[in-house]
Amino acid sequence: MNTFRLFVAAAVAAFFLGCKSDAPKTAPTAGPAAKPEVFLYAVNVDNLRLRDKPNQKSTVIAQVKEGAMLEGVGNESTNQEEIELRGIPYRAPYYQVTALSGDKPSGWAFGGALVCVYAGSRKDSPDAARIGAFAEYLKTLDPKDIASGGKAWGFVETELADASRPLADAAFILLERFLRRMEMEGEFYKMTEKVPFTEADGRDIYTDRFNHDKYPTTAQLAANGFRLVFGEGAIFPVVNWGRFQDYFGPRATHPLQKFINQRTAQQNTPMYDDGGLLIPLEKVADVAVFWEKFNRENPHFPLGDQCRESERWLRIVLTSGSDNTPVFSNETQTVGEDFRSVWDYIQQAHPNTELAKLTKQMAELCAAEGWKRTPKVQDFQAQVLQNN
């Protein structure tokens, strides 16, 4: 289970992708969407350093406390640096920001220490004081105490019950991030190790039919924002996305509603376990295309790093397979019928997508190579990994 937690932590850190130089740039736009007028961030570490240049060797202008709110216009550095925060290495660029309290200092802040809670017009931006109060409250909670989940939910349901849609989005982003931190740091799987689950319980958990009120421990987990899942040969708690869907679905903006609905569906129907795929490759392709289209339609979505990572990972799975779902047969080193079939499916069901272009190249190359795993095919797969 510790290995599983380390994998999750590494995946979170991997959302930050690499760049090359130290010169500042303006955040790029995609498609017809206009660049947001303002970006709003919550500080996720204490004593965040604002610097005069976007690198660790530059002069510190000011320090900002955890939970403080910052704003920017989307300027980020082209370079990225790797810094460890709470035991997790983050590789991220710097953002040019201004504090919204105190003397309102401006400078460059390391992106891994920021949580973007809004990107859009200034007139529609959420109340920074109210979301800042929630960020400050989260700072007082112990992520290793299961009761903190219920307290965080309680703040949202009482203090932010009348939130505008952008404010509801910001509240969701901070709440989900805090609960995910609890999941990684709290080791709550040790609680479930002591529960006398039956075989029937295991089946109900796997099929999402388990009554969490059955045992005091599972009821406590559910009350604090968690649910049970079965994976890697064990039963353990994860953040309950169904609760997010029930509460934020009617309150969030349309893009966040789509995001929550998709994440909830993926939690309810896991696609990956023990190095292999649990669902048909065609379903994997459908999810990959969902994220591709979502990212194109919402280039400045505050949780865009997560969405782009989902698109990237699924694109790689569909061209390179996974440990226990390989593209090439271990015996014959030829492309399996399931991958040949899904590449045809993508061309028919999802034409004019980037995934269709990529898998068409893969299929045509494999066909030209007699569907064998040749050096040319391996080079193409390596290129896909490098470019994604």
Image (spheres, rainbow, N blue to C red):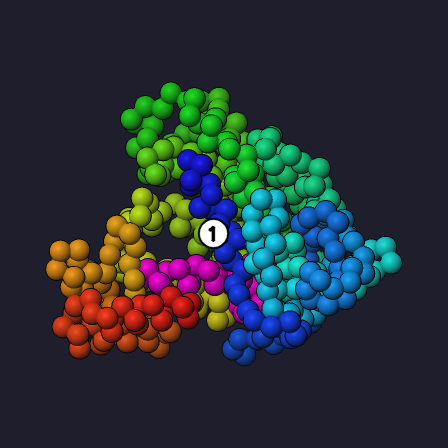
* Quarter of the image that includes the N terminus: top left
Residue labelled with disc 1: 11
Q: Residue 326 is drawn in which quadrant?
A: bottom left
Image location of residue 363, percent across then percent down: 23, 72
Q: Which of 45 and 263 is in front in this view?
A: 45
The amino acid type, in three-letter code, at marker 1 is: Ala
Image location of residue 50, percent across then percent down: 75, 59
Q: Which of 217 and 371 is in front in this view?
A: 371
Q: Is residue 242 visible?
A: no
Q: Which of 33 and 181 is in front in this view?
A: 181
Q: In this view, does 198 lie above or below 78?
A: above
* Quarter of the image that includes the C terminus: bottom left
* 303 in magenta: yes
* 324 in magenta: no
Residue at 68% in and 41% down:
138
What type of secondary structure mainly makes up the magenta span?
helix
Could you tell whether 146 is left or right of 265 in the image? right
Could you tell whether 8 is left or right of 99 in the image? left
Could you tell whether 111 is left or right of 219 in the image? right
Q: Which of 10 and 32 is in front in this view?
A: 10
Image location of residue 67, percent across then percent down: 72, 48
Image location of residue 383, percent across then percent down: 36, 71
Q: Residue 387 is drawn in which quadrant?
A: bottom left
Q: How crowded is mark 1: few (under 14 residues within 10 Å), some or many (20 or more)?
A: few
Q: In this view, does 304 lie above or below 324?
A: below
In this picture, which residue range is highlighted in magenta? 298-318
Could you tell whether 56 is left or right of 262 in the image? right
Q: Can residue 133 be seen in this view?
A: yes
Residue at 33% in and 50% down:
271
